[in-house]
Amino acid sequence: MRAAVRRSPAARPASRRGAVFVEEAGWELPASFGDDAAERSAIRDRVAIADVTARAKVDVRGAVPLALPVPADATLARISAAWSIVLAPPNEEESVLGALAPVAAAHDVMITDVTHLHAGFALLGPDVGRVLERVTSWDHAALGPGEAQAAPIVEIPAVVVRPVAAPSVVEVYVPMEFGRYAWQQLVETIASLGGAPVGWQALRAEGWR
């Protein structure tokens, strides 16, 4: 029997915008919107949005140690002293859970796979700040590289992450049931600024992971 393939709630509206999908790591990923060169240009020169819902997401709550033994290809997003989220490539949930198991055993910490609970969107490019000014009342300028914060995005409770290695990137994670609405609102805002949705081919070509 063929294994089920997971899809983002934004897959259907992305398809209407020309997204071409590929199956990878148990997910249906939006590989491209038809013009990789234009997509890479949007990332470098304007602003772009990518659906990164497929990322593995592991929630860590409790007396979280400052240093966590996360895999090398994972990102630790520390939201508060008692709450962090670990983000990793698609289908790497078990790897993250295994790496964090000793922490759960030694500390008063609860570790939960929440991949299925959050849709995720990466906002990329020099005009990311202009997008955030239009979709949130929260002071995004206070979020430094490597930091994360709970904040409203298009009036939806979200977790916002700014990766250490990519200061012109902000990742937004919203409850899965609001994923389609958030995608549509963010795409429209980005389009009004001359940006566009992009696929994973352009993301990876520009060094995102």
Image (cartoon, helix red, strand yellow):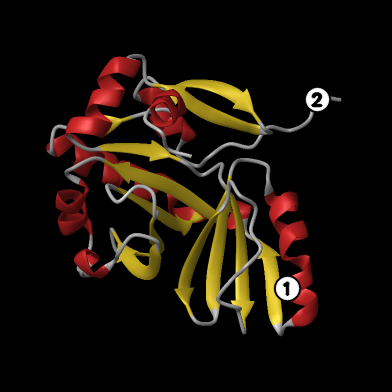
* Contact flag, marks 2 and 1 (Cβ < 8 Å): no
- Disc 2 residue type (three-letter): Arg
Q: Which mark is residue 103?
A: 1
Secondary structure at numbered mark 1: helix
- Choose between 169 and 197: the one closer to the eye: 169
- Choose between 118 and 92: the one closer to the eye: 92
Measured along the vertical axis of the image, is residue 164 above or below residue 44?
A: below
Q: Residue 151, percent across and down?
A: 34, 69
Residue drawn at the location 21% of the way across and 55% of the way down: 132
Q: Residue 118, percent across and down?
A: 53, 55
Q: Which residue is mark 2?
A: 2
Which marked residue is nearer to the observer: mark 2 or mark 1? 1
Secondary structure at numbered mark 2: loop
How many numbered marks does the figure carry?
A: 2
**Residue 195 visible at all:** no
The residue carrying pointer 2 sits among few (fewer than 14), some (14 to 19) or many (20 or more) residues within 10 Å by Cα, namely few
